[in-house]
Image (tube, rainbow, N blue to C red):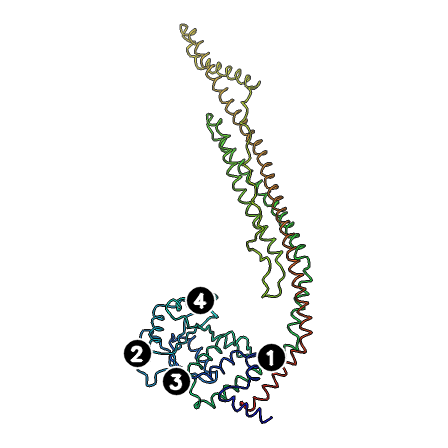
Amino acid sequence: MPDSDRTAVGASADPGVPPELDAVVARWNPQGMALLTALRAPGSAGQVALVAPDDANTTLLRTELARFEPRIALTEPLTDVVGVETTLSAAPTPPAAALILLDAGSALGADALALIGRLRAAGTTILLAMNGIHAYADWRRVREHDLALLAAHGFGDLDILPVSARLAVAARTGDTALLDRSGLSALHAALTAATAAAEGDGRDRRAAVLSRVLTDTRRRITEQIEALRSDAETARWRAERATLLAARDGGRASATAALRGQLHLARVDLMTETGARVRTLHATARAEVDRLARGELTGYPRRLQQSVTDLTAGLDQDIDRRIAELAHGVDAVGAPVAPDASRAPAFAPGAHRAAELPPRRVDPAPRVGPDPEPRQAGVEDHLMVALGASAGAGLGRLLVSPLSLVPALDVASIPVTLALGALAAWWVVRARRQVADRAHLRQWVADALVNVKAQLEQRVATALVAAETALAERVMRESAQRIVDNDRRVAELEARIRRASAERPGQLAACERDIAVLDRHLPVAG
């Protein structure tokens, strides 16, 4: 190694690192660069007061922080927010800073804000960290809310570092990107900056930290070299391009086939349901007609019309539900192919779109037709008059036969016989007319419901044809949009593949140059 390099490294162990090494570390390891910058800043050595709940998450965070160099001395968790100042003032050596752990699932409370104000007034350096971000999907919203609260109370210069000790545990397999996402490196750098010792007290400590940062940076560059040589990302792009090329029609064929099949099934189901409802209504109407009194027969057509209106309303609900299911099914089948999870599809199944189905035209309920015509008296009615009179006369003659034994009453029995005959004839004719009127009304109901069923089936067919037209138009429009998106994505992937193939030799050479820079300094740094 040249003497000039050794001299530069010897200087880097204390006040800083050579410019070329600075550039390599900043390019590949921003968290490590932040740690080195923190070591250069003046600070006061000492413990950091940990204000946090004494639970498993806090313990795991302390454990993971203990794996970083330089070691940060943390106090035991101080759970009593109100009595923190008393506890700190009673310590033999007051802590150099205070680390307050916030919950990622709840907003900053009034007690925590009051504690921050009191610590600020006492001149204590304050660090805020939001622990457990892996467990809360909306931790970013909570963090923004907490930052707004801090700014409103005059603490706008404070930042909240999002951290997750569990992500740091998962990063032990060597996943440096996951370690960066955990936030532990940034928190360690901030703690180091707050507790950095004076210039003459930490030379060995800073040399150890520099060695660790350089080793970590070299590992990151090595991972990138392996990724470039394995061409894994380009292979993933090629696989995505092949998948997109296999779906050049934008899902039009599958969506059209699904639409046709589901429309046929919906038509069969709705027609069957319509027939079943009309048959049920017919049976109910026949039973009602049989129970009606003679005076109620004339008002029954209005009752039947109301029943048909209610039946139509229920059928309209079934039609709307099936059309909605059709639209959802077509959306699900025609979903775009998106192998790249980071690429948001143009149309997501089930999402609200600008081209929704137009409102279905709802016609009035079918009419049962004009009221039944008055029944015309026929030969059977006249025959029933004669039969009734004959039966009545015979019955009357039988009833007054005892009077004929008395000569004086024989003549008087004749009017009685005639009256009884007339009464019997009237009753028989009335009963016959009522039976005939019921039969006439039942026949009218049957004819009316046949007409209603035909109109309802036409209603179903019209609604499904309109839905088919709208859905087919939407399938064509969305598949055309997906074809454009897929072609654009294919062109983008092909450009990336060509660019990656052209840039790979230069990137490998740059990585090897950075490795050489690190290798020149690693022995001295260690």
Please report whichever mark, 1 or 4, sits nearer to the chain's N-terminal start: 4
Is label 2 in a helix, a strand or a loop? helix
The image's mark for residue 86 is 2
Label ID, residue 56: none
| Mark 2 and mark 1 residues within 8 Å of each other at the beta carbon | no
Instruction: Name the residue that disc number 3 marks.
Output: 46
Q: Quadrant of residue 249?
A: bottom right
The image quadrant that residue 241 belongs to is bottom right
Label 4 with label 3: CB-CB less than 8 Å: no
State the separation of the CA atoms marked 3 and 2.
18 Å
Mark 1 lies on residue: 223
**Does residue 407 appear to the left or right of 82 in the view shown?**
right
> Which mark lies nearer to you, 3 or 1?
3
Mark 4 or mark 3: name the one nearer the start of the chain: 3
Q: Residue at x 57, y 46 (%)?
A: 358
Which residue lies under the disc numbered 4? 144
SS category of the residue bearing label 3: loop
Q: Earlier in the sequence, mark 4 or mark 2?
A: 2
Count of marks placed on residues: 4
Judging depth in this view, the residue of 447 and 171 nearest the camera is 171
Work out whether 277 lies above or below 236.
above
At label 3, counting other C-alpha atoms closer than 10 Å, the crowd grade (few under 14, some 14-19, many 20 or more) is: some
Query: In terms of image quadrants, where is residue 461?
Result: top right
- Amino acid type at image mark 2: Thr
- Picture coordinates of residue 231 (x, y %)? 66, 75
Q: x and y percent of residue 33 in the render?
A: 52, 80
